Image: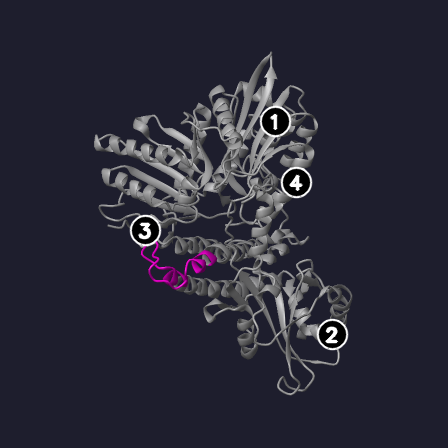
Amino acid sequence: MAIPYINRELSWLEFNQRVINEAARGKLPPLERLKFLAIAASNLDEFFMVRVGGLESRGGLDESQADPAGMSPGKQLRMIRQRVEVMAEETERILLEELLPELAKHKMQALPIEKLKPVQLDHVASVFEESILPLLTPVELLDGAPAIELVPALCLCVLCEIGSGESPSAGGARKVLVPLPASLDRFIKLPNTSGYRFVLLEELVMNFVGSLFPDEVVHNIGLFRLTRNGDAVLEENTHDLARQMGDALAKRKQGECVRLEVDPRFPDRLLDGLKIILGSKSQHVYSSGVPLGLGSFMELLSIKGFEPLMLAPRAPVMASSWLPGNDIFQTLRDRDIFLHHPYESYDPVLALIEQAAVDPDVLAIKQTLYRTATNSRVISALITAAENGKNVTVVVELKARFDEARNIERAGELVRAGVQLIYGVKGLKTHCKATLVVRKEDDLLKRYAHFGTGNYNEVTARVYTDISYMTSREDYGIEAAQLFNALTGGVKLRKMKVLTVAPFHLRKRLLSLIRKEMAFAEKGEEAAIDIKVNSLQDEQIIEELYAASGAGVKIRLNVRGICCLQPGIKKISKNIEVTALVDRYLEHARVLSFHNGGSPRLFISSADLMTRSLDKRVELMVEVKDELSRERLLGLLSGHFKDNSQAYILESDGTYRRLKSKKEKKAFRTQEHFYRLAVKESGQLPAAEEMRLMPHRPPGQPDLTQGG
């Protein structure tokens, strides 16, 4: 008998709906709301490239290939389209009826070409001639012939029907593609206007594109955007993984159409021709009144002078356990360091690597890298360390999806500096987050380790919630060394005590921990499991959680995104509660707690509860034994289950209901709580939000800096 199971793709779409819901919150300032719409649009781009692309690659309409929820690829694709169309309608309503009018009131506004004053029209015409036209490259397409390889993915493109006669039929009309280079500004600012009034690049090009075709007539024109299948498969059958990854990326650029977004004004006859050119079908076509490529509207958030239309920035506070200028090694000899990002600064993690790079007593640095910042301080420090003669070993994952090209480039820099580089391991993605520093102290070798739930990326550490745990405890250092020996030397990885590694031991350890709670419950003792992850999809883990619920274990799950488990089903999952949190920061930390008869076992992990994480990746779960850090983890979990302002509860039918605080119960907002707690415990002044000067406002004028 199949277990109750929510379809993975539809569950992810519900997560994206929760992001859109934030854009619908009228209490948020308008640019903050626009940010959530842009994030949802970018999320959807990747969803189509990877998930929809994967479904189409597996046979599309083959009704025999059902998922654990009993849905064939064809049915999933049909239901995805229905759900995406509903989301598109809501996005259009929020943007066109609420956000754009609200932004226009504050003098941030897109103006259509036809409403420009003569002097403005002259200006944009000049901009087009001088700064845009020289970069446009028209590409003629053979009528009725497929030519998808000529169309760049996720790029705004103009398709023109050009002829020498007065009508398309009179002069042998031809079709010409005009891609809009990504290097061009999307927003063309108008001169001599207050605020920030602009014309969209695509409107400008469509209005003046005739300049590309002297002595000819543009009969029809349309704007579109192609999404390709980006589910590139890497066959690891060569020693030159970097070159093979480059080939895989090239193939991704030639993937088939999985989505064709068109402007509502796109002429029907021209669209029929475009579908032939792209080899696309009607089910691939999406038409919306929202500007195509809405993710790029994130750029509007950086326009100077409109800061009051966003939430005031918050600077991470410095944890009291370490202050800038302190010796990180001395600190770690005295105590472990537990950090909750982004409330607490990422600087102690950077300090470990940067101080190790120049410390004459440091002999070796070993690190895993999955995604890094563009101008990464981590990579700069590793290069410095290698140049200073340290033995630096880096396991860089070339297969980190959509960061492959950057990782290949950064890998080259590390190699040139003398870093010993390992391109992950064959057949698996290396997703664990670990650093090991070996230092000579009093003629002995001392190990210092960092373990995290997030990437070594100081930029995302300011917007993702993650955990860092740093220690000089001997058992952690020894086991971290064993992990790196396995990653770099193929050494057999034996079962360890404080570290648990996927794909070798993590699944078994999780099942064992769940079953132990079941044993407590069956003896009539208190039994509980609290888990915070980004995704829960693995069938075996779900089945085991159902069994634990049936045995009487109280289970609370906080799952940000995909959750295929169905809670609240009588006799199956009545003891399971699932919540999800969407707020200012992206929830990313993975934390697990098992009651263990009153002596809780607490873990942080790089892994979500997904089959790919447990079986197809090198992941790391770390048991935290430091008492102060354990208290922090218990408080973190408790805080995430108390939220009644930004949290949703998953119903048994797969729908999500937003939690609301009851009148008699005080509102609790998790992310706000942890920010205030970090400020209080650091003993520092509040961050940027509290240090702003607050101007007096005329009566009735709203305060747009408050997020509600």
Residue 59: x %, y % from top left: 41, 61
Say whether disc 3 or disc 4 marks the residue closer to the N-terminus.
Answer: 3
SS at mark 4 in the image: helix
- Which circle, 2 or 1, is nearer the viewer? 2
- Which circle, 3 or 1, is nearer the viewer? 3
Task: Examine the structure image and report whether residue 54 is included in the region drawn in magenta.
Answer: yes
Q: CA distance from mark 4 to mark 2?
A: 43 Å
Query: Magenta region's main secondary structure?
Result: loop
SS at mark 2 in the image: helix
Residue that numbered label 1 is attached to = 323
Q: Which sits in the foreground, 248 or 300?
A: 248
Above or below 361: residue 564: below
Above or below 176: residue 458: above
Residue that numbered label 4 is attached to = 412
Dot 1, how many residues are within 10 Å of its Cα: few (below 14), some (14-19), or many (20+)? few
Residue 143: x %, y % from top left: 60, 76
Q: What amino acid does circle 4 point to?
A: Gly
State which quadrant residue 504 falls in: top left
Q: Which mark is residue 211?
A: 2
Please say if the residues under marks 1 and 4 sit with CB atoms less than 8 Å apart. Answer: no
Say whether disc 3 or disc 2 marks the residue closer to the N-terminus.
Answer: 3
- Is 99 left or right of 492, judged from the image as shown? right
Say whether disc 2 or disc 1 marks the residue closer to the N-terminus.
Answer: 2
Above or below 151: residue 388: above
Magenta range is 53-77
Q: What amino acid does circle 3 point to?
A: Tyr
Q: Which mark is residue 308?
A: none
Dot 2, how many residues are within 10 Å of its Cα: few (below 14), some (14-19), or many (20+)? some
- Camera sees residue 65: yes
